[in-house]
Amino acid sequence: MNSRRVAMLVCVAALVLAGVRAGSAKPAPDDTNAFAAADAQILSEIRDHSQAMDNLEYLSDEIGPRLTGSSQLKQANDWTAAKFREYGLTNVRLEPGQSPIPGRAGRRMRAL
């Protein structure tokens, strides 16, 4: 039993050391600037133009609960497909899906 503990301790120590060593790898200096610039641009876009909260509020407050087979689910699927098209996605379509409720067919959305 004692040898199992020692073996486990050695394995854990090896994993920790491997993780520390992998974490200490740093990108080349010019890569850091390119990554920092890209990060700043992404964060700026999120801060200044994000529609995530507006979309969440619309789905939650205007459409409400979206139970399988409900009219709210259809409304949410149609609204989301329209939003995807508005955002420039192509080949957006609703596909039939299986509902866990007998006699009701759900609809799934898929954007390609």
Image (spheres, rainbow, N blue to C red):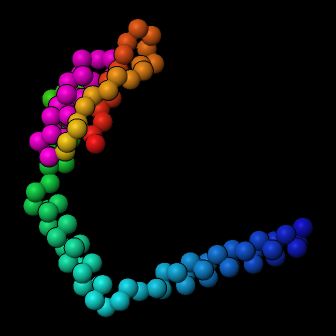
Provide the residue span drawn in magenta: 66-88
Instruction: Left or right? Give the position of 76 relative to 15.
Output: left
**Residue lying furthest top in this view?**
103
For the N terminus, the image quarter is: bottom right
* Residue 61: % across, % down: 17, 32
Q: Nearer the viewer, residue 82 or 13?
A: 82
Q: Is residue 105 above or below residue 76?
A: above
The answer to whether residue 97 of the structure is visible from this angle is: yes
Residue 53 horizontal side relative to residue 109, left or right: left
Which residue is at 48% across, 86% downward? 24
Q: Quadrant of residue 69?
A: top left
Query: In the picture, which quadrant includes the C terminus?
Result: top left
Q: Based on the picture, tell me whether residue 13 belongs to the magenta stretch.
A: no
Residue 59 visible in the snapshot:
no
Q: Residue at x 38, y 23 (%)?
A: 97
What percent of the width, then of the height, locates residue 84? 18, 41
The relative height of residue 71 versus residue 45 in the rendered view (above or below) is above
Count how many numbered circles sit on residues in the image: 0
Residue 77 lies, with reference to residue 16, above or below; the image says above
Outermost residue to the front = 91
Q: Residue furthest bottom?
A: 29
Residue 79, image x and y in percent?
17, 31
Dominant SS type (magenta): helix
Q: Nearer the viewer, residue 95 or 105?
A: 95
Whether residue 77 is in magenta: the answer is: yes
Identify the residue at image location x=42%, y=21%: 98
Q: What residue sits 29% from the left and 32% below the top?
A: 109
* Quadrant in the rendering for residue 2: bottom right
Quadrant of residue 101 within the rendered picture: top left
